[in-house]
Amino acid sequence: MEVSWSCVAPTRGSSSEEMREGDVVMVYLGPEKVTSIHLTAGESFENKFGRFDHTSFIGAPFGGRVYSSRGHWVLALAPTPELWALALRHRTQIVQSMDSAMVAFELGLRDGSVLMEAGTGSGAATVAFARACAPTGRVHTFECNESRATEADADFERLGIGGGGVDDVVHKKEDDDHQGEEEQGRRMPENAANAAAAAEDGQRRGGGGGVVRVHHLDVCGEEGTSSVEKDLPWFDAVFLDLPEPWRAMDFVKRRAKPQARIACYSPCVEQVQRTCVALRETLGADDLVTIEARLRDFDVRPIDFPAFAEAAAKEIRDDDQPAKKRPRLAPDTQSVLCAKPAAMMRGHTAFLTFATVPPSEEAEDS
Amino acid sequence: KEAMMNRVVAGEWVLLLTCHETYVFVEAKAGATFRLNRDRVAVEPLLGAPYGARYQLRGGKLVRFFRSPVVVLPESGGSSSAAASQDKTQRLDEASITEMKRSGVDGEAIVESLVEGSATFKDKTVFSQEKYRKRKERKYLPWVRVLAPRAANVAKAFFAKGPTSKRLAVRPDAVAQLLARSNVRAGVDVLCVDDTGGVLLGAVVERGARVKVPFVGASPPAHDALKRFNFDKEHVATSVSYFRLGGGSGTEPPARALVVASKRDPRSVLGALLPLLRPSSAFAVYCDVSEPFLPCVTDLRDRGCANLQLTEAWVRNFQVLPNRTHPNMVVSATGGYLLSGITTADQRSQHAENMNAAPDIDTVLGEGVSRADGAAVSTDDAPR
């Protein structure tokens, strides 16, 4: 049975994994140098290695080399959320893979989980969460900025994890307010049929057929969103990456299940403090944990250590030079394979605060 | 909304977090007990308890309790200048307290008596008073919280227990990284080598993957932790299969992800298992120390792996309270090291011309440019 390829969906049944038109392919040029292409016959792209026709990718295996017009090659890799985060265009500051990995784990995301994410931003974390929740779970991601919502939705569609177009709650609400407008919101026409079928699917799906559903809605909004909330499912987990997460707490309180796990991502201490107050006061959460996490990279390479003796080389070689350019080892020089810490590291991304919505209060038994 | 809640079911494992920040696993069955402070406590009141609920020990029994988490801002001072040596400031002596306990006085009443009996209590700062009260409560009115048995909590519980001769203790954030960087996901075959006692295996099963566990020797390592997740037995039976390495898992399709937390040499683990992965599959390996990874990286560069990363994670907790926000005093010093990458279809060994330096993809990609036009390798192609 053929299933569409994506980093999150089960892969194709065929024994050889060939790239096909319509696939998203990650072009690997080197460490942290990854770009993405959407295979379309007739298109091509250029980089320092030459011009690459998309047709040379089609039919070639994932993980293999693809050659340019000049005879040089790049690696074509299957998309993963981590590669996607390296390649995507940053519309907003993205959530680093390390942080989204921690959130997915702490929130207990698994196949079947229903997650609320606000805001969508560039969608890097959304893709990572979709991987954890797929194929039966759902990621409902809320973005207040319409063009960001549209761009993210297009990305998810291409990756094979989206579908249904942007649920334009903002305009739907305006339509409701205007009573009797024809417009159903900005859904793409071909998905109207999908939407109808999906409506029967039950609360969890919230419309559309993919794992990710993008909603154009400001969850911090002052005006009540209750008229449109009835179409939303109950959330098992919530991820807030907002400038003012405390303003979304009322929305979370209405839509999150009891025992739902919450994660808030904020770069500034002041934001964290106000968020913690809101978690305690609005949700009644009493198990707050705030952490910061960082990754240190190591570069593995042989480094030479000449002996402190006359016979050793007069010069100490520069070990940042590529291997081929280094002069031969002198006697009494140790070449040691080392894990050299990278000189610079990311000093800070954001603080992560985790909490749980308490179980509903019941009357105390005797 | 109440109907949606998950609760402790008879016969299942229960994970408790005590007021002393220790973890306790106990079975939810008649007659089961666990130790809290110096008392043996019956598990029975926890049957049907919703995950997240808190229970206090009162009159020798666990009783559900609720407390508002709202933290009140202190209005004004008090100071620590009045503090004297602890011996002299408490009116109640050891014997009186013991007597109160023996005659069944409620823990809360004991704490109140201690508060009243403390000469310096009223002069302390509000923060100090709160700390004092909490300390006395942990002693005379201890409580436990029922935790959901999901991977994050089981990982914390096992990490707190520490390593044994048979079992690695992997910090929970390392488990999180292992899952993400190996691209474990539902619906695909994952190879998993787990010497954590089953914590990693449980986390992979929780995500929904089909797991194939290779082992060497007479029998696979014990994965007792798996039971603590309370997975449906049939689900585990269909999701997890063990196979002996070299026993020929021949006809099965190659796996799409490899995740390893083993006490064995990573170089030999990768050497044995990478050939069982499809090209463009991710793998992630954990080790307490970095040295065993170094020859691995050289090997992997020879094979032509993409996106090789060797990392160490640093994690710090914060206390966030009004006027008292600061990083925690006690912090874990290490979460081990993680090596991850993506396999390629490429067998690079035939290209290794220069024996001094393993030509990795990055150097060759750079060479590609210089060969064509004779120019030097550009600076942004420096080998990793």
Image (cartoon, rainbow, N blue to C red):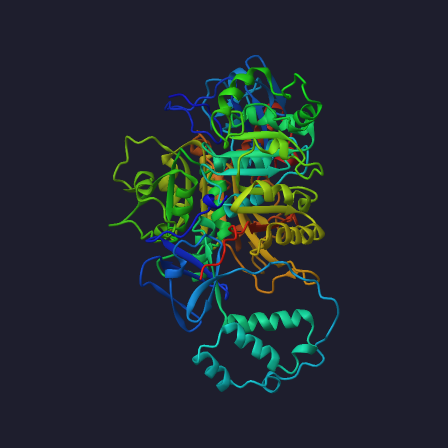
Most foreground residue, B211 or A165: A165
* Number of numbered discs overlaid on the protein picture: 0
Q: Position of residue B90 (x, y in %)?
A: 59, 84
Q: Farthest residue toward the top? A: A42
Q: Quadrant of the C terminus of chain A?
A: bottom left
- Above or below, comparing residue B140 to residue A20 in the picture: below
Q: Quadrant of residue A136?
A: top left
Most foreground residue, B342 or B64: B64
Residue A227 visible to an observer of this rendering: yes
Tell me: A120 left or right of A66.
right
Residue B288 visible to an observer of this rendering: no
Q: Quadrant of residue A242?
A: top right
- Above or below, comparing residue B215 to residue B37 in the picture: above
Q: Position of residue A149 (x, y in %)?
A: 65, 29
Q: Quadrant of residue B320?
A: bottom right
Q: Residue at x 57, y 79 (%)?
A: B114
Q: Quadrant of the N terminus of chain A?
A: top left
Q: Farthest residue toward the right? A: B76
Q: Position of residue B278 (x, y in %)?
A: 40, 31
Tell me: B99 left or right of B321.
left
Tell me: A259 left or right of A167.
left
Most foreground residue, A55 or B169: B169
Q: Position of residue A105 (x, y in %)?
A: 50, 46
Q: Residue at x 39, y 59 (%)?
A: B25
